[in-house]
Amino acid sequence: MVRPYALVRGRTKPTGDVLDVISMIYSLRMSAPDPADLEPEHLAVLRQCGLPMCVADLASALDLPLGVIRILLADLRDRGLIRIQRPRPERLTDVRLLREVADGLRRL
Amino acid sequence: MAYDDCDASRMPHFDETGAPVAVKILVAGGFGVGKTTLVGSLTEIRPLRTEEGLSGPGAAIDMIVGVEDKRTTTVAMDFGRITLNHGLVIYLFGMPGQERFWFMWDDLSSGTLGAVVLADVRRLADCFPSIDYFERRNTPFVVALNCFAGTRRYQQDEVRRALDLDVHVPIVSCDARERGSCRDGLVTLVDHAIDLVGSGVAVSPTRDQR
């Protein structure tokens, strides 16, 4: 049992912008990570994101606080090990997409 | 991520990275109004939440008049997921109701499709901060009256007057424990968002992504 913020050496802020909770993350495979440089949790994130996964899903899957996940992701981004797909604001005014959301909900 | 209920007959929305399109819907409202219950009724995954016992001092800060049976509260966030089809996923986030967690609101609300503001007719004023917040940000929202056992049904115009709510903002009745009822609330919200786009209401820059 390790206190979550000990995993990121007591840091409470990620480098760079704050990642949206629904940003999609996926692992890049071109460069092999250096295990000496990474914590096991970094590697766990890379394993989880073989298929794109959003930040909140990652926090849930790894059972880590959102703040810790964001720091781990910033580390991985700085090392070029992941790609981040941010949500696009123009989707919020895309009526076709909104209709699909409404219709999808009606079918539940 | 599992998408078991994928339906190949529908056009998936994947973006160029192969990621499904994710939309964010918020569940807001005062402390103890039923946000956690609503997210739990709709989500296909175990809701992610951190509940903490209400201590004596905490109970003094968190007004629990009318919810005296409540012994825990959400201090982190509720998070749920609804997969609509192979390429389209709704993420639900509960916004912590207590004033001392309002700093989290901006973080969660950026780029949201809209919000369901849950209201308890016995403590209507508790949802004022949420309504103010979404009005200021031009975020589409609906007010859902959570029908607790033992509360009388209120007329919608009565509630609209009490909340000083714009005539175009939908008010629905809802039982946060019932999946179908919660689903209908979300449908009303998305239809309302479509109406706002159609009516040319400007999208607030605060809805942009960071």
Image (tube, coloured by chain):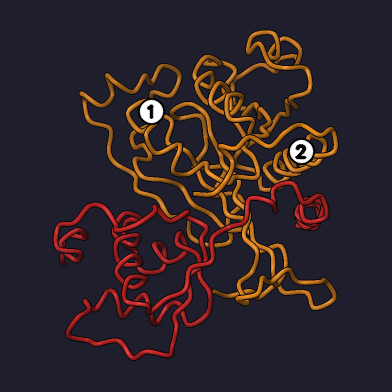
Mark 2: few/some/many CA within 10 Å (<14, 14-19, 20+):
many
Image colour for chain B is orange
Is residue B63 found left or right of A100 in the rendered image?
left
Crowd class of label 1 (few under 14; some 14 to 19; many from 20; radius 10 Å): some
Q: Is residue B103 above or below residue B38?
A: above
Left or right of B122? Residue A66 is left
Front position in the image: B66 or A103: A103
Q: Secondary structure at mark 1?
A: loop
Residue that appears at 72% across and 9% down: B158
* Gap in angstroms between the C-alphas marked 2 and 1: 26 Å
Q: Quadrant of residue B103?
A: top left
Mark 2 / mark 1, whichever is N-terminal = 1
Q: Using the image, determine if residue A1 lies above or below residue B157.
A: below
Tell me the quarter of the image containing the N terminus of chain A: bottom left
Q: Amino acid at mark 2?
A: Thr
- Could you say which quadrant of the image residue B6 lies in? bottom right
Q: Position of residue B151 (x, y in %)?
A: 61, 19
Residue labelled with disc 1: B98
Work out which quarter of the rendered image holds the C terminus of chain A and state it. Answer: bottom right
Q: Give residue B188's mark.
A: 2
Picture coordinates of residue B139, whole percent (x, y): 63, 34
Q: Provide residue B43's location: percent of width, then percent of height.
A: 58, 55
Which amino acid, mark 1? Gln
The picture's colour for chain A is red
Image point 39% across, 54% down: which residue?
Answer: A17
How far across and how far down the image is residue A57, in percent? 47, 64
